[in-house]
Image: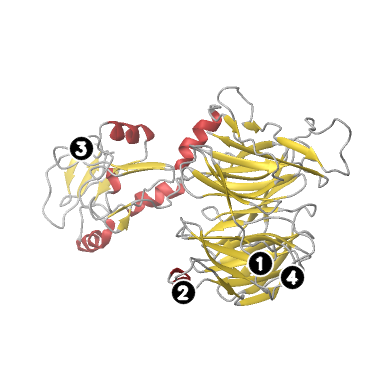
Amino acid sequence: MTRGRPEGQSTRPIVKMIKSVGITCRGGPEEGTAKHPLAHDMAYICRRPIEGRVTASIRSVILRPRPPAGQSTCYTEGGLASGLGRVKTVDFRYYFSSDSEDEDAGAGGGDDSANGGLFRVSCNFSDCLTSRESGCASRFQPLHLASEYGTRHMLSNAMLKEYPVPVPNVNKVFCSQWLSHRQVVFGTKCNKLMIYDVNTRHLNEIPSLQSSENSRPLEQETGIHAIEINPSRTFLATTANDTKDIAIYRLPTLDPICVGERGHKDWIFDMTWIDDQFVVSGSRDGTISFWRVTDNLIEEVTSAPIPTYKFIRPVKTKVCKEADRVRSLCYNHRTQEIAVISLNGYIHCWNALRFKQIMTKKLPHTMENVCLATDEDAQMYAVGSKANTDLLDARSLQAIKMIPSRNNGCGIRSVSFKGNILTIGTGIGILLFWDLRAGKFLESTMNSNQAVMLKTSKGWLQSEPEYLEEDDDYLDEEDPAVYTHCFDESGTKLFVAGGPLPSGLQGNYIGLYQ
């Protein structure tokens, strides 16, 4: 048998073989306009030779005399024989490229350059580091290193250190998003929208937008439960001062754009962006509203001589069938569907293009389904309940895997995907990390057979006046619930926030792991 691939042979069987052994090819950085077929989801580098035509040890071709056109070469037990003669025993026969194979090669299945540098791509992590250290990791040898590499390495080696952020007189942080590599925005139960700078450790409050005079405010407020940023990171959507209305800010200046009214009659629990203009919100009254931020609206606000914002109404509002209260929702870009979970234990699937409900299914666990996340690469949803995290197939909503909590009855309060790592925030101040590839909790390299786990500090905790006892301002025995967590773009910083789980207690926990 020969080693290597002779000139002109098609690489399609090679790609099929790679797929058959389980190597995932998810695309990646582009060279020209075509994506590399071997673009690995973790790391790869386009290796280019400094001298010569090919990089060393990339491809070795055995040199042999080429027979005349139309003839074949036979390899027998006795050696090389011409295709003109008759060979009794043939162990291996190689056919040189014919006219039909040349056509396939011209369509992109032949030589090395036609396949976008198939044999010049290395998925070795050490090659990426060597290229970066030698200074070739710019345009000469473009490389791609997924942020999951850093996240997995720092978690398994216990490199993340907790930096608590003391913020008194702020009650329960429900949601958060990274604005940049140094700023994170979060919303609280006391209806405050705040920005924390991780470098200077400064905390600033953004004024909430007021609704119009025609809007009737709710008798009881519940705080900010949702903060979402559109795909181009030009707008931020959250709730207004009246928590049944939405508020749109412009990024990065956080200038107010508009307030959306008359879409819901109760608290807004979650929202998600469909694209850069359309946003969907879900409410406690069981309705889903479809909003649009038009270019004309932005031009009117930005061109006004006095800073102001507009009031808009939803494009459409519909009742989610079989839903008691809409608790969380997310958008799947690959299927163009909106997934919604309700507190009565159902998951609902909506077509985002037609804004029509197409599917409803009972969840495996029906108690306290309060959080939802989607992994578009693996086409699955993660739903957190009272004692389990369920992984569902995004196409059929069938249960794939049940992840039991390591602490019975602690409750799952937040879930998120970072590559192949599912982060789970519990109600007792513990963060767990599930490895989707291995099908088990992420293991530590420091302690063998021990799962990676982050335990938060106590934070600030104070009881309500009616529950306050004498000389008992701070209740240290209570662990805060992790209501929200989010990794930054690099995957090396983790923002965690929450507060006490009982509704009769007020307090907060805010921490940064880096």
Q: CA distance from mark 4 to mark 2?
A: 28 Å
Q: What secondary structure is found at the residue carrying circle 3?
A: strand
Q: Disc 1 vs disc 4: Cβ atoms closer than 8 Å?
A: no
Q: CA distance from mark 1 to mark 4?
A: 9 Å
Q: Nearer the viewer, residue 406 or 482?
A: 482
Q: Residue placed at 51% from the left, 53% from the top?
A: 377
Residue 180 in percent (x, y) is at 47, 47
Q: Earlier in the sequence, mark 1 or mark 4?
A: 1
Residue at mark 1: 245
**Dot 2 surroundings within 10 Å: few (below 14), some, or many (20 or more)?**
some
Q: Nearer the viewer, residue 27 or 69?
A: 27
Q: Nearer the viewer, residue 159 or 366?
A: 159
Report the mark closest to the observer, 4 or 3. 4
Q: Residue furthest front?
A: 306
Q: Identify the mark at residue 482; answer none if there is no mark.
A: none
**In this rendering, does residue 414 appear at all?**
yes
Residue 434 in percent (x, y) is at 61, 40
Residue at mark 4: 265
Residue at mark 3: 79
Q: What secondary structure is found at the residue carrying circle 1?
A: loop
The residue type indicated by label 4 comes to: Lys
Question: Left of 61 or right of it: where is 468?
Answer: right
The residue type indicated by label 3 comes to: Gly
The residue type indicated by label 1 comes to: Asp
Report the mark closest to the observer, 3 or 1. 1
Residue 438 is drawn in which quadrant?
top right
The residue type indicated by label 2 comes to: Glu
Residue 336 in percent (x, y) is at 54, 67
Residue at mark 2: 300
Q: Residue placed at 54% from the left, 65% from the top?
A: 335
